[in-house]
Image: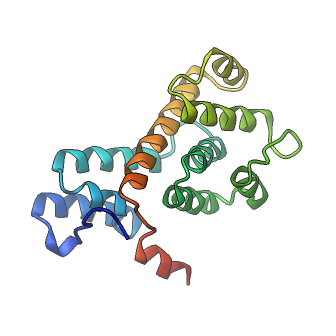
Amino acid sequence: MARIDLPEKGWVPSSIWEVYTGAENRLGYVPSTLKATSHSLRSLRAVDQLLQAHETQGTLEPELRLFASLAAAHRNHNEYGIDQVLRQARRFFLPEDKLQAILNDQVDEALFAPSELAAIRFAWAMTERADAGEPMLTELRRHLSEEKLVELAFIVAGRNFLDRIQCTFDLDTEPEVLAERN
């Protein structure tokens, strides 16, 4: 059970209702993260923009973006975040064995490409400490352009930000998403 009230669409002011409607149009449901932050319109709008940025594809390959996101959510022990990333990863048909390897901390050269390993290690480092360090950046530069490096840092930082909100308020997977699975 969430540690904060999660206002439903029918019970919120019109300014919040508009944000909920936008999310519902994009995703088919209103994420619990938006509901939790709806108590502050400013925070709600900022989180919605972050979620939109995470939903849209930049120049970074989906597998790098999603493997790094999953690695961060897993390191943060955020079941809700893990569930969110797994849903996205499966929509991109990412290999289940790689997803499970990340969740089981069994990431190695036999299964992952060098760029994937670098992205996962970067996510771990950035999740454990704010500065991933020069060695991580050097490793990533062997595989990524500066543009992709910045996108990866944004994705991991955003995932860590969302994880902190989701864990603090003990958010669960949305009922609509659970119903969709069954």
Q: Residue at x 63, y 62 (%)?
A: 90
Q: Position of residue 35 (x, y in %)?
A: 28, 62
Q: Position of residue 157 (x, y in %)?
A: 47, 35
Q: Image quarter for residue 126?
A: top right
The relative height of residue 127 versus residue 168 in the rendered view (above or below) is: above
Q: Position of residue 3 (x, y in %)?
A: 32, 62
Using the image, determine if residue 160 lies above or below residue 94: above
The residue located at (83%, 41%) in the rendering is: 108
Residue at (71%, 31%) from the top-left corner?
Answer: 118
In the image, what residue occupies the spot 35% across and 57% down?
169
Image position of 57 (left or right of 99): left
Q: Quadrant of the N terminus?
A: bottom left
- Tell me if 137 is positioned left or right of 6 in this view: right
Q: Which image quarter holds the C terminus?
A: bottom right
Colouring chosen for the image of the structure: rainbow
87 vs 175: above or below: above
Q: For residue 27, what is the image quadrant?
A: bottom left
